[in-house]
Image: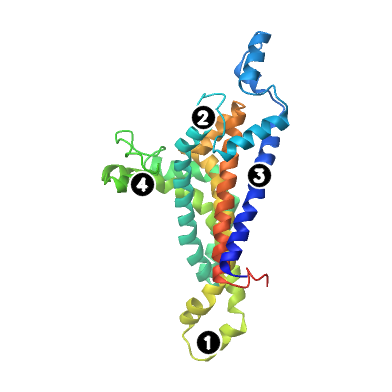
């Protein structure tokens, strides 16, 4: 199978997958034993007021009809109107999504640039003091909840040492950059707003380290195991026996093949970062989709809940598509089913 045919097949499989995700999300959100009408209106609301509210938001219609209307709107990128804010959910998502993407993507960079080199080093220097120290630290990092790491990080690096700014996305005295992409770091670079760029980067450091550090632990373990497996292969020993330097063998022969399962894990890691961003955004007062999802959940705002879940699921599926294509490019046996 050619690479183009493999990519086309993977793209076509996205359609039933996204429909299934939307259906599952819709059903689960409506299985919650709570009534949004009761959350928005008081118990003393008149029956005609309750009926008008249900009719206005389509809650009086059968669930299959509600889902079909939602799916039809989804095809037009229309997620409905938020019950609480009375704004289109798509507009709310466009406002909050860039902040979450900026945080999750920066955290992914932290995960990659720390996890892969440390995984390679601990595999090469197996059972050394470096390997033991990194494994102990990674075990502690994997055991600690994200919210605890975030609180400790704020306490130590903001309150005690004053190395990083406090919660938020930018200093209160600095105006946000002109909106182009919604990513403060990118927009400030495009508009050459250096004050906003410096402030946004400083505010991004600690939450990205907390969020990415948690996932870095697992990526380190995957990389270490993969490199150890490859180092035991015969072609690696043969290359070393021919007189090639050890680090030449490691980086030219072992690491490229060991990174194939590591790349596969990156797709799962990005999905975990998006999920973990909910807790991180709350602790760091980060105005992203995590806070928006929490508000929608506490207020039983079904359109907001379904919209957030669907968007995150679609991003997760799209990232895994990119990962699959990258894997098939690195190892043609994957698209050939071998």
Q: Earlier in the sequence, mark 4 or mark 1?
A: 4
Comparing 98 with 321, the one in front is 321
Q: Quadrant of the N terminus?
A: bottom right
Please tell me whether mark 4 or mark 1 is closer to you in this view. 4
Question: Which residue is the site of mark 3?
Answer: 19
Residue for point 46% across, 81% down: 248
Mark-to-mark CA distance, 4 and 3: 34 Å
Comparing 2 with 295, the one in front is 2
Secondary structure of the residue carrying tag 3 is: helix
Question: Which residue is the site of mark 4?
Answer: 185
Q: Residues within 10 Å of mark 3 (few under 14, many from 20)?
A: some
Residue 300: image x %, image y %? 62, 27
Q: Is residue 336 left or right of residue 253?
A: right
Q: Is residue 160 left or right of residue 127?
A: left
Q: Residues within 10 Å of mark 2 (few under 14, many from 20)?
A: some
Question: Which residue is the site of mark 1?
Answer: 240
Question: Which residue is the site of mark 2?
Answer: 88
Mark-to-mark CA distance, 2 and 1: 62 Å
């Amino acid at each position: 199978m050619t690479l183009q045919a493999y990519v086309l097949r993977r793209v076509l499989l996205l359609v039933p997958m996204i429909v299934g995700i939307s259906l599952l999300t819709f059903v689960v959100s409506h299985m919650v034993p709570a009534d949004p009408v009761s959350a928005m209106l008081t118990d003393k609301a008149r029956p005609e007021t309750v009926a008008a509210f249900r009719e206005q938001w389509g809650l009086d219609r059968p669930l299959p009809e509600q889902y079909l209307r939602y799916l039809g709107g989804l095809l037009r990128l229309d997620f409905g109107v938020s019950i609480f804010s009375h704004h289109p959910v798509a507009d709310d998502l466009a406002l909050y999504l860039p902040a979450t993407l900026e945080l999750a993507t920066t955290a992914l960079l932290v995960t990659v640039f720390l996890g892969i080199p440390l995984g390679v080093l601990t595999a090469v220097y197996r059972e050394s003091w470096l390997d033991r120290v990194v494994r102990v630290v990674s075990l502690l990092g994997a055991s600690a909840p994200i919210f605890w790491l975030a609180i400790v990080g704020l306490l130590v690096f903001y309150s005690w040492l004053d190395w990083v700014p406090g919660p938020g996305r930018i200093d209160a005295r600095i105006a946000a950059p002109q909106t182009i992409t919604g990513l403060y770091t990118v927009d400030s670079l495009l508009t050459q707003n250096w004050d906003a760029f410096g402030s946004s980067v400083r505010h991004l450091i600690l939450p990205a380290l907390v969020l990415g550090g948690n996932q870095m632990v697992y990526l380190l373990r995957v990389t270490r195991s993969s490199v150890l497996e490859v180092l035991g292969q015969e072609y690696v020993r043969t290359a070393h026996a021919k007189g090639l330097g050890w680090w030449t063998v490691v980086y030219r022969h072992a690491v490229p093949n060991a990174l194939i399962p590591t790349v596969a894990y990156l797709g799962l890691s990005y999905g975990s970062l998006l999920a973990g961003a909910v807790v991180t955004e709350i602790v760091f007062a980060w105005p992203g989709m995590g806070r928006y999802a929490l508000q929608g959940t506490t207020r039983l705002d079904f359109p907001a809940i379904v919209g957030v879940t669907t968007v995150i699921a679609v991003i997760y599926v799209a990232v895994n598509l990119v990962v699959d294509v990258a894997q098939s490019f690195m190892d043609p046996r994957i698209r050939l089913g071998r």
